[in-house]
Amino acid sequence: MKVNIEKADGCRRVLEIAVPAETVKSDYDAIIGMFAKEVKISGFRPGRAPVELVEKRYSKAIVQDTKDRLIPRFY
């Protein structure tokens, strides 16, 4: 993990945190698995939809959930 702190105007600081790719990938995959178990996609039984289809349909929500999980942990 790499942390970079820059001074901004006044008492403000800009914080930049680099999270290892392996950590992001493992959390991303875990969240896709959770989505695959919970979402209902027509033509598939609940929890049986292909992961690729779930990832394609819910990509924005998956990315947001990944960010929501990683930011508090590394902040």
Image (cartoon, helix red, strand yellow):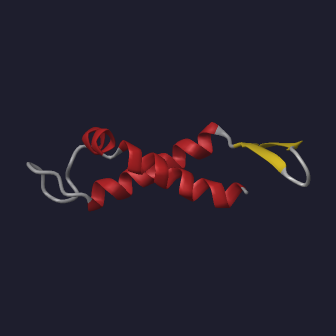
Residue 73, above or below 18: below
In the image: residue 14, left or right of residue 24: right
> Where is residue 16 shown, x and y percent of the image?
76, 42
Instruction: Give how far across and how far down residue 57 sits, in percent.
Output: 28, 43
- Please indicate whether residue 46 sits to the left or right of residue 19 in the image: left
Specify whether 39 is left or right of 28.
left
> In the rendering, at what x and y percent does residue 43 appear?
8, 48
Residue sitting at the far front: 10
Farthest residue in the left direction?
43
Q: Nearer the viewer, residue 67 or 32?
A: 67
Residue under the point 53% across and 42% down: 25
The answer to whether residue 52 is above or below residue 48 is above
Q: Total marks drawn?
A: 0
- Which picture quadrant has residue 14? top right
Asked where in the image residue 50 lies, by quadrant, the reply is top left
Residue at horizontal 74%, vertical 44%?
A: 17
Viewport quadrant of the N terminus? top right
Task: Please tell me which residue lies in front, 75 or 1.
Answer: 75
- In which quarter of the view is residue 34 placed? bottom left
Q: Position of residue 6 (x, y in %)?
A: 87, 41
Residue at (85%, 52%) from the top-left corner?
Answer: 12
Q: Quadrant of the C terminus?
A: bottom right
User: At 48% across and 51% down in the image, what residue appears?
Assistant: 64
